Image (tube, grey):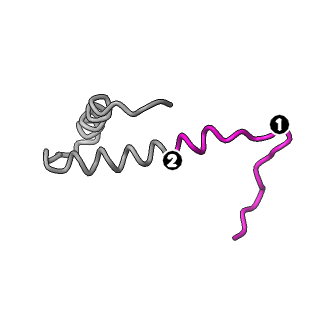
Amino acid sequence: MGEIDDKALEAYIRSAAVALGISLEDAWMPSIRANLAVSLRLANTVAEFELPDEAEPAPVFEA
């Protein structure tokens, strides 16, 4: 994933809000956009991590 396009991100936020029936204040948009941009960058970091072919999910997670 390259650089996040602010216009596309804002269009996605507005479309998602309409689909979910959520009203948005224009003043909230910078915070929502920043939060979603960070979430997308973190998700991209996880998605880019290469796993070996023999890797399998753990049947039980214990902390």
As rendered, which of 61 and 1 lies closer to the eye? 1
Q: Is residue 43 left or right of residue 30?
A: right
Q: Position of residue 61 (x, y in %)?
A: 72, 63
Give the residue at x 32% y 34%: 9
Which image quadrant is residue 54 in?
top right
The answer to whether residue 54 is magenta is: yes
Q: Nearer the viewer, mark 1 or mark 2?
A: 2
Tell me the amino acid under the disc marked 1: Asp
Residue bearing the label numbered 2: 42
Give the x, y percent position of residue 10: 26, 35
Discs 1, 2 touching: Cβ within 8 Å? no
| Residue 52, placed above or below residue 2 | below
Q: Secondary structure at mark 1?
A: loop
Range shown magenta = 43-63
> Magenta region's main secondary structure?
loop
Residue at 62 percent across and 38 percent down: it is 48
Which dot marks residue 53? 1
Front residue of this view, candidates 22 and 10: 10
45 is within the stretch colored magenta: yes
Q: Is residue 60 left or right of residue 6?
A: right
Amino acid carrying mark 2 in the image: Leu
